[in-house]
Image (cartoon, rainbow, N blue to C red):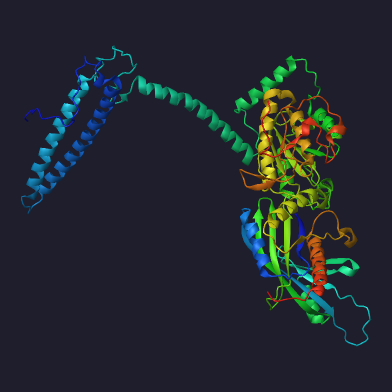
Amino acid sequence: MQHQALPQPVSISSPPPSSESRAAEAPPMQVALAMDRLSQAARLIADIRLGADRLLEALFVASQPHQSTKPLQFFAKEDASMRQHLQDLRSIGKQLEETGVINESLRSRSNSWGLHMPLVCPDGAVVAYAWKRQLAGQAGASAVDRARLAFKAFSDQKRRFFPHLEDSPSDQSGESVSKRRRVSVSHEDDATDYKTLSDVLAQLEKEAPNVKVFTYDRLDWLKRAALLPASANENPMEVSKEQSFHSLNRLGPDSVGAVATDKVAVIELLFPSVFRAIVSLHPAGSIDPDAVAFFSPDEGGSYVHARGLSVHHVFRHITEHAAMALQYFLGVKADTALYSILHWICSYQTLFTEVCSKCGRLLAMDKQSAVLLPPVHRLYRTISTTKVSSTQLVSSTKDQSHPSSQAYHAGCYSKET
Amino acid sequence: MPVKWVFHWQLNPGTTVNSQILAEVSQCAETINGVKGRWKANLTYYKPIFRDQTAPSEIPRDFIGISLPEQPNKCYFTLRSHRIVVEADLSIQNIMEKLQSYKSRVTLVFEGFQYHLGDFQVRVGKVVPSHSENLRGIVMEVEYLPISSLEKSREIMEDFTEIWQETLSKRSLPGRFIHAEPNFSEFGLSDNYTSQHTAVQYATVMAQLIASAQSVPAVRN
């Protein structure tokens, strides 16, 4: 075989190793060239493989009887192209060697760009260096974030679609977070005395006499949700008595027992004819809310739960807003978050009667969704956990004076620090 | 059931109803991002048939049977003068025919388009006698889907009506929509909205249309 010095297929000349400082061959360019050549080499290798197949095929055909000179011509053609490929590969290999890709000759030399040439390891793996490593590092960091988000998304989905499943012991982050919260509660001397669910509910009943509060464990709520809507003229309590829920673990606020409380995972707040709000507690038996959703009192079905969405625009908007309020309460003071969110939910009893504090109207066109809505926002940042007198909460329709229940349209609402 | 208000078009004195009004109103609904569909309802005036001729002198003439699109298997009967409303199965019409007890005097059809505007559903329709294109009136239904309580929905419905009237007034139409709310408790109906409420509202609308038609001769469109 002739070892010919063919003109190089690559039109870019390879720089001598010492000329890194030349402007035309700045480190990023070198690295780019190296990556380029590596990919060319890979293509040539693929071509060589194909050529080898073709040669074998030509040999096979030639071995068949009664053949013309065609296979011979084919063979000669393939031979020529194979040699060309092999020589191209050799020259690229030489270039790569010179630029320090195949060996580590340049590794010790770091340039001001912090870049290194990619290295081809003996087993064929290409190790890209600093600039790719940086990207890889970023990818790694974002991979951690993404994994975290994915985990959260999966656990959210699990809770949404399988709310009756007990969370596995491997759900470390949720449990450890709430454990941490509880630990901090016990260390502090907390002024508020809403430490148990029954305390919270009792206090709520005092402040919002119109509300009906029910508690359930998760499975029982699902059963109830599927049977909603109760016939409009019947009291929901009567309905469930008629249908004799033997397993319904319903606790009235005046009958909360210590044993039963540790299973409570769903709190239902019903303002008759106005709305129904569902709050989910996680883990069951705690006072840590993790989701809240609003529905029409006439809605029913298995989608009615703390991570479900109402079919009505007005309640969808409120549910979105409530998610933000919940995050706020959990962030500001997690141990009173349940009381805060329940108290805040009660401010919606004026949903269809209280005008917006900014524009003075009841209905307004929501620009984003092009739908007429009543004021769906209620302030939550100014809410405090101190006891509110019941007279203030049961406001008349024209009374907008109570700061914690000021109503706003989504468009009129401006974030106040 | 979601709360519904039924309106009828009250003409300015001296004007007559025409299909132009209907077209303008429909256009108005379409501009507020409504999603369109069709709807149709029937209303029949019945009169009792007597075998013998010794009919009592005072027979109420406002016995109405209404079929509504949201309740395809039901028929609603009202006797407005006596504040009675009854929900019956559709097969009652067979019974009435077989028994030859009641005969239909005139049947009116309410027909038009419906629009879904967020949580509101608006229906606009013409009132024509069956087998005729003689426009007798225009009706509108406004439904607010999230609420079933008449009392709780009152302010929202009033607000919507105001917005709607404002939008319509820009088109300078001869007349406006009126909602005459009947006294539902007199009919034994509760605050919770049902199709019986709708039937009573339609009976009231018919009474209004007849009253106004008697003062103005009905014209072809």
Determine whether, in the image, residue B65 is placed left or right of residue B188. Answer: left
Query: Residue lying furthest top in this view?
Result: A108
* Quarter of the N terminus of chain A within the rendering: top left
Determine whether, in the image, residue A302 is placed left or right of residue A274. Answer: left
Residue A101 in view, yes or no? no
Determine whether, in the image, residue B37 is placed left or right of residue A30. Answer: right
- In the figure, residue A25 lies in which quadrant? top left
| Residue B70 spot, x, y in % from top left | 71, 62
Question: How many marks can you see?
Answer: 0
- Of residues B68 and A378, the one nearer the viewer is A378
Residue A332 in view, yes or no? yes
- In the figure, residue A346 lies in which quadrant? top right
**Residue A415 vertical position relative to residue B24 in the rendered view, above or below:** above
**Residue A215 vertical position relative to residue A302 in the rendered view, above or below:** above
| Residue A409 spot, x, y in % from top left | 70, 40
- In the figure, residue A124 lies in which quadrant? top left
| Residue A291 spot, x, y in % from top left | 68, 35
| Residue A179 spot, x, y in % from top left | 67, 22
- Of residues B208 and A264, the one nearer the viewer is B208
- Of residues B7 and A202, the one nearer the viewer is B7
* Quarter of the C terminus of chain A within the rendering: top right
- Of residues A77 and A223, the one nearer the viewer is A77
**Residue A350 vertical position relative to residue B219 in the rendered view, above or below:** above
